[in-house]
Image: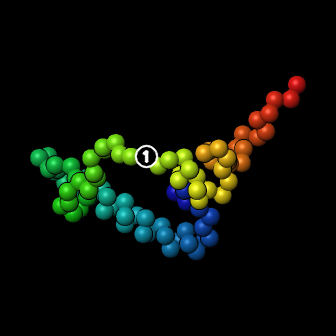
Amino acid sequence: MARLARLQLTEQEQTDFGPQITDILGFVEQLSELDTSGVEPMTSALDVENRFRDDVPDQSLSAEVATRTAPASQDGTFLVPPVLGNTSSKK
């Protein structure tokens, strides 16, 4: 399991964690035996309302305001370092 998770564990850590992993997997196996028919799926253990606001268009920032605090900008656009190498074509 450590190899799959790309963890480098010492022999002692492997010895210590082995029984813990076995206990966790045993608990998960017990959970899979529960009859959950008729139980609604949950996204949270707490009974909460959706906190997202309606997606309603609003006034946008102007290019000047949006780029005001940028490390580098020009003519209302953000200037960023190239991520795909040099974009100028040399023939």
Question: From where the camera sits, is residue 33 visible?
Answer: no
Q: Nearer the viewer, residue 53 or 38?
A: 53
Residue 67 visible in this rendered orientation of the protein:
yes
Q: Residues within 10 Å of mark 1 (few under 14, many from 20)?
A: few
Rendering coords of residue 59 (x, y %):
39, 46
Q: Position of residue 58 (x, y in %)?
A: 35, 45
- Residue 5 quadrant: bottom right
Q: Quadrant of residue 23?
A: bottom left
Left-right relation of 52 to 36: right
Q: In the visual, does 51 lie left or right of 10?
A: left
Residue positioned 53% across, 71% down in the render: 15
Image x and y of residue 53, in percent: 27, 51
Task: Give the camera-side residue of 50 and 40.
Answer: 50
**What residue sits 71% from the left and 48% below the top?**
81
The three-letter amino acid code for the residue at tag 1 is Ser
Q: Residue at x 40, y 64 (%)?
A: 22
The residue that disc 1 covers is 60
Residue 54 at x, y percent in the picture: 27, 47
Between 22 and 34, the one lying in front of the other is: 34
Left or right, 40 with reference to 62: left
